[in-house]
């Protein structure tokens, strides 16, 4: 098992080095931790959007540092040690090695925003209340946009779900036991699922329970946001690392101590 792990890490290091060799620059992109549930879809979309021009690397910072250098003395390419440092600590991040211009690469990163289902333990971005009365859910047959989340402006106080009333249908009677098991006070009345009282499923800023996460899914709330942004760029011709987001850089105390290149500034 240890041999397999060493071989796997060695192969990943070679992949990282090849990406640095084959592309003139790299964009470091990051996203808020709450977007983890939608990150896989977003990263896949980024790979598809930049296919033929770029290579997305999602790897642990320690592996990237081993591949590209832990400091100036063992850098694989000029200034490359700071790329590994960019992945250690702070919010989650990835690397986009690319032949696109820095501006076009940053636009590609921003263009793959996604929404996903919240997980238990995540912070609730809205207060969601199920009103007393017939339980209505989003129509499962209605088309849902697959691309960037258009619901980023979800209100802080939300009732019944994100879909307009015209897109809601009565909850199937077979779902009533599941809703009740998730803590929603329900009953069957003349074949329809009925909520017995106004019920607060979650409150904005509070951690979601497993039951609350399950109810949000039933009611169509895709509240996990994968909203990546370019936070730094690295130029392989010796231009070094340029920081685009000072707040992000502040969360990486080892960034300025690794490698050379520009200290970076906004812009």
Image: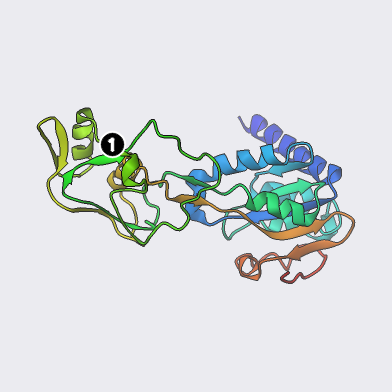
In screen coordinates, is 39 left or right of 85? left
* Quarter of the rendering occupied by the N terminus: top right
- The residue at the far front in this view is 166
Q: Nearer the viewer, residue 22 or 51?
A: 51
What's the residue at 39%, 57% (across, down)?
123
113 lies above or below 179: below
Residue displayed at 34% across by 56% down = 207
Picture quadrant of residue 125? bottom left
The percent coordinates of residue 34 (x first, y second) are 47, 54
Picture quarter containing residue 154?
Answer: bottom left
Work out whether residue 37 can be spotted: yes
Q: What is the basis of the colouring in this image?
A: rainbow
Left/right placement of residue 144 relative to residue 214 reads: right
Label 1 residue SS: strand
Q: Nearer the viewer, residue 246 or 7?
A: 246
Residue nearest the viewer, comparing 69 with 243: 243
Residue 20 rendering spot, x and y as whole percentages? 81, 46
Instruction: Locate residue 46, reporting x and y percent.
Output: 65, 43
Q: Residue under circle 1?
A: 169
How many labels sit on residues?
A: 1
- Residue at 40% across, 53% down: 122
Which quadrant: the C terminus? bottom right
Residue 171 vertical placement versus 111 (above, below): above
Asked if residue 70 can be seen in this view, the reply is: no
Residue 236: where, in percent of width, then height? 86, 54
Residue at point 55%, 47% (across, down): 148
- Among all residues in the image, which is located at the extreme left? 190
Q: Residues within 10 Å of mark 1 (few under 14, many from 20)?
A: some
């Amino acid at each position: 098992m240890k041999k397999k792990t060493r071989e796997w890490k060695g192969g990943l290091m070679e992949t990282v080095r090849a990406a640095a060799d084959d592309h003139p620059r790299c964009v470091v992109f990051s996203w808020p931790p709450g977007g983890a549930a939608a990150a896989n879809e977003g990263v896949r979309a980024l790979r598809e959007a930049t296919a033929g021009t770029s290579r997305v690397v999602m790897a642990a910072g320690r592996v990237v540092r081993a591949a590209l250098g832990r400091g100036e003395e063992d850098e694989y390419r000029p200034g490359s040690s700071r790329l590994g440092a960019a992945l250690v600590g702070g919010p989650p991040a990835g690397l986009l090695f690319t032949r696109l211009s820095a501006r076009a690469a940053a636009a590609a990163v921003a263009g793959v925003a996604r929404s996903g289902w919240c997980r238990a333990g995540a912070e609730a971005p809205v207060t969601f209340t199920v009103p007393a009365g017939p339980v209505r859910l989003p129509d499962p047959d209605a088309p849902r946009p697959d691309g960037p989340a258009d619901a980023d402006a979800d209100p802080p106080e939300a009732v019944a779900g994100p879909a307009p009333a015209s897109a809601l249908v009565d909850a199937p009677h077979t779902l009533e036991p599941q809703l009740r098991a998730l803590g929603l006070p329900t009953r069957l009345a003349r074949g329809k699922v009925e909520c017995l009282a106004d019920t607060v499923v979650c409150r904005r800023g509070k951690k979601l329970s497993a039951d609350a996460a399950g109810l949000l899914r039933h009611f169509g709330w895709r509240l996990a946001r994968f909203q990546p942004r370019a936070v730094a760029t690295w130029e392989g011709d010796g231009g070094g690392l340029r920081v685009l987001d000072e707040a992000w850089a502040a969360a990486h105390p080892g960034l300025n101590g690794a490698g050379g290149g520009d200290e970076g500034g906004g812009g």
